[in-house]
Amino acid sequence: MTTPLLNIDSISNYVVLPTGSDTVVQSVFLSGQTRIDTSIDTVKAVASICQQPASGHFLQQGSIPIDIVNRVDNLSGWLTIGVLLLTFVLTLVWYFFPERVLRLLSREGSKHKTKYEDNQFAKPGIILYFLLGITFIVSTSLFIYLLAERFFSDVVSGYTFEQIIVAIPVLILLYFLLRFLIIFSTGLLFNTQDLAAKQVRAAFRADLIQSFFLLPLLFVLLNIPFTVFYFAGIVLLMIIIVYKWGLTLYIGAKSLKISLYHNILYLCALEIVPVIILLKLMENYGLVFITS
C-alpha cells in the first residue's frame, strides 16, 4: 500500500512526510519556530550593526566615506509665510485707513492728532486695536523664540515647538496685563487717571513702532540667520524699552503732583514687580528653576 506524501515548499526546499501523522504537525510547528528564531537572530544582528559607531566607508574597496545626516524639521518656511501674511494685513490696514494708524502713532498734541481730532472716521476702533495688538504679540513672541533657539538651545530642546510658541505669547500677555494693572491702580490711588491713560497710550505707540521694525527683521532672520541680525533686534528692543522709560519719566515730571524721586520709584516698581511675578509662575510650573 502506497502512503500519501505531503510536500511543504519553503523556498525550493522540500520536506517529505507522511500525511495524517503527528510528525506533520510537529514539523510544521518546528518549521515556524525555526523561522521565529531566525527572525530573532536577524533582529539581533541588525541591532548589533546599529550599535556600531555611525561612521565608516561604503564599498570598502572604493573607500567611499559614509556621511550620516540627521534630518530635522525646519519650520522657517512656514514662519516666513506667517510673517508675510501679517505684513500683508498691516499693508491693507495702512492703505485703507492711513488716518487711523497716524492717529495712533502720533504724539500728544502733534499736527496729525490735531488734524484728525474732530474726525469721527479717524478713530481707530476695536478692530484696528486688535490687529495691531496681535501684530505686536506675534512679532515679539517670534523674535524671542528665535533668540532662545539661537542662544539658549539647551533650554529650548527640552520642550516642543508647540509648547514654546504657546508659552511665550501667554507670558508676554501676562506681563503687560500686570503692567497695566499697576499703572491704573496707581492712577486710582493718587487720583492721576489722566496721567495713567497718557502713559498707556504712549507705551502702546512704542510697541507699535517696535512691531513695524521687527517684521522685516524677522523675515531676514528666518532666511539669513546671521548673528548681527539677532543683535540688531536686541538693540531695537532695548531702544524701545528705554524710550518707554523716558516717556514715563517725562509724563510724571510734566505733572506738578509727582516728583522725580517718586517717578523713579514708580518706574522701578512698574518694571520689576511684573517680572518677579512671572518668574515665580514659571518656577511653579517648572519652566525655570530659581536657585537662591
Image: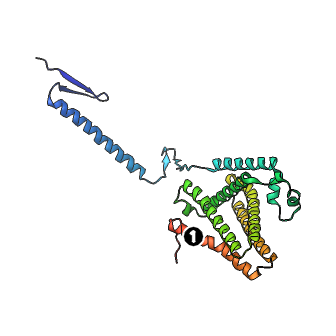
Closest to the observer: 63 or 213? 213
Q: Position of residue 8 (x, y in %)?
A: 25, 27
Q: What is the tally of numbered marks visible in this picture?
A: 1
Question: Vertically, is 49 above or below 152?
Answer: above
Residue at 72% across, 51% down? 127
Closest to the observer: 28 or 95? 95
Closest to the observer: 65 or 136? 136
Q: How is the image coloured?
A: rainbow
Question: Vertically, is 158 above or below 92?
Answer: below
Left or right: residue 118 versus residue 71 is right
Left or right: residue 220 versus residue 172 is right
Residue at 76% across, 56% down? 212
Closest to the observer: 105 or 76? 105
Query: Callout 1 environment at 10 Å: few (<14), some (14 to 19), or many (20+)?
Result: some
In this view of the protein, can residue 166 be seen by the observer? yes
Question: Vertically, is 246 above or below 236?
Answer: below
Q: Position of residue 75 (x, y in %)?
A: 61, 50
Left or right: residue 49 versus residue 196 is left
| Disc 1: which residue | 279
